[in-house]
Image (cartoon, rainbow, N blue to C red):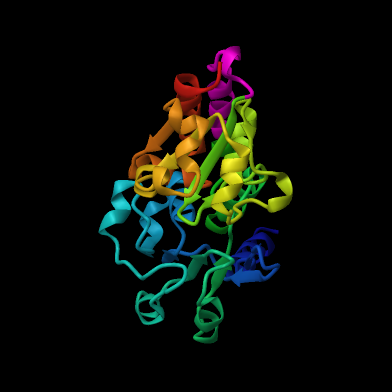
């Protein structure tokens, strides 16, 4: 009997480990023989998620915008989502490349034999799902524990706001164009949880490109915008007469704060606190 059990043990040890399979936002199932040890990330929120899951050491390259946590700033830069350096990525010999679904280069990388996982969170539910997918990829136990902590942080930020500023009508600009954060985006969802009302209608989608005249007609109580995009606010047609500008109800976010706000990842509770601070200080009473 002992010999039988010993042979069975040796046989089990000799069997190959089950392949790791994860499915990305394209519906493509990625099969890996083992969890990846060399990862290139081409989206800052994915970079931050890998690190928050305790696996920053597996990153061997990142896009030019990944700057948090500080450890990733020393990694090789391989371009961005719209202009990835295929040659630089291949040279890093990654086991997997994390990339936004809308980014360029996925097919080219795959044609060169690299594994590509395309993920692009735009809503809070997307961000939660991405934690699960990357946790599965890295074989991190209970990756959603981090999401539960994020969700609790958002709830605490909402509870910190006085009732008087709730229902403030907000315009949040995510980039020059202007591109706005709609109600169905993760930013819009955070604003809703804080009790604010978004002046952008749901039917325009998560991050619509707006006609500047739309904002004039909407006349929001409060404008939220990054410092880099706010230099020409009063020069935009009709904007000088906006109530929010006349009454100094504008929150300008530093570049570091803007990074926190526009990345659907581990720092979403911090983003909620930034939004809550803005609404508390300059919301409509």
Please give the name of the residue rendered at 62% of the width and 62% of the height, measured from the top-left corner. Answer: 9
The residue sitting at the right extreme is 203
Relative to the observer, which residue lies in front, 249 or 106?
249
Query: Is 79 colored magenta in this rendering?
Result: no
Residue 18 screen position, x and y as percent: 64, 66
Residue 170 screen position, x and y as percent: 57, 34
Tell me the magenta residue range.
148-167
Residue 76 screen position, x and y as percent: 29, 66
The residue sitting at the bottom extreme is 111
What is the quadrant of the N terminus in the image? bottom right
Please give the name of the residue rendered at 37% of the width and 82% of the height, measured from the top-left corner. Answer: 87
Query: Is 159 colored magenta in this rendering?
Result: yes
Q: In the rendered view, would you say 83 is above or below 126?
A: below
Quadrant of res 17: bottom right
Residue 14 screen position, x and y as percent: 59, 71
Relative to the observer, which residue lies in front, 6 or 67?
67
Please give the name of the residue rendered at 58% of the width and 56% of the height, measured from the top-left corner. Answer: 209
Tell me if I can see residue 97 in this picture.
yes
Q: In the rendered view, would you say 8 is above or below 246?
A: below
Task: Characterize the magenta stretch by its predominant secondary structure.
Answer: helix
Please give the name of the residue rendered at 67% of the width and 60% of the height, measured from the top-left corner. Answer: 5
Tell me if I can see residue 148 in this picture.
no
Residue 135 horizontal side relative to residue 225, left or right: right
What is the quadrant of the C terminus in the image? top right
Residue 71 horizontal side relative to residue 235, left or right: left
């Amino acid at each position: 009997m002992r010999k039988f059990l010993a042979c069975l043990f040796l046989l089990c040890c000799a069997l190959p480990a089950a392949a790791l399979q994860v499915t990305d936002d394209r519906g493509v199932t990625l099969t890996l023989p083992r969890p990846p040890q060399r990862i290139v990330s081409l989206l800052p929120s994915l970079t931050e998620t890998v690190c928050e899951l305790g696996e920053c050491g597996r990153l061997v390259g990142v896009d030019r915008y990944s700057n948090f946590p500080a450890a990733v700033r020393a990694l090789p830069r391989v371009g961005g989502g719209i202009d990835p350096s295929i040659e630089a990525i291949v040279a890093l010999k990654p086991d997997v490349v994390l990339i936004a679904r809308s980014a360029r280069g996925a097919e080219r990388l795959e044609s060169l034999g690299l594994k590509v996982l395309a993920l692009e969170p735009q809503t809070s539910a997307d961000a939660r799902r991405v934690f699960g997918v990357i946790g599965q990829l890295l074989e991190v136990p209970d990756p959603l524990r981090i999401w539960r902590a994020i969700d609790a942080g958002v709830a605490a930020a909402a509870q910190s706001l006085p009732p008087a500023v709730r229902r403030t009508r907000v315009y949040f600009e995510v980039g020059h164009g202007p591109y706005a954060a709609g109600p169905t985006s993760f930013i819009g969802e955070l604003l809703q949880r804080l009790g604010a009302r978004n002046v952008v209608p749901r039917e325009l989608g998560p991050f619509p490109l707006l006609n500047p005249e739309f904002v004039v007609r909407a006349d929001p109580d409060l404008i939220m915008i990054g410092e880099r995009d706010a230099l020409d606010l009063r020069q935009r047609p009709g904007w000088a007469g906006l109530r929010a500008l006349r009454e100094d109800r504008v929150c300008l976010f530093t570049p570091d704060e803007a990074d926190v706000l526009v990345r659907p990842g581990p720092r979403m509770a911090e983003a909620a606190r930034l939004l809550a601070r803005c609404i508390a200080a300059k919301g409509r009473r």
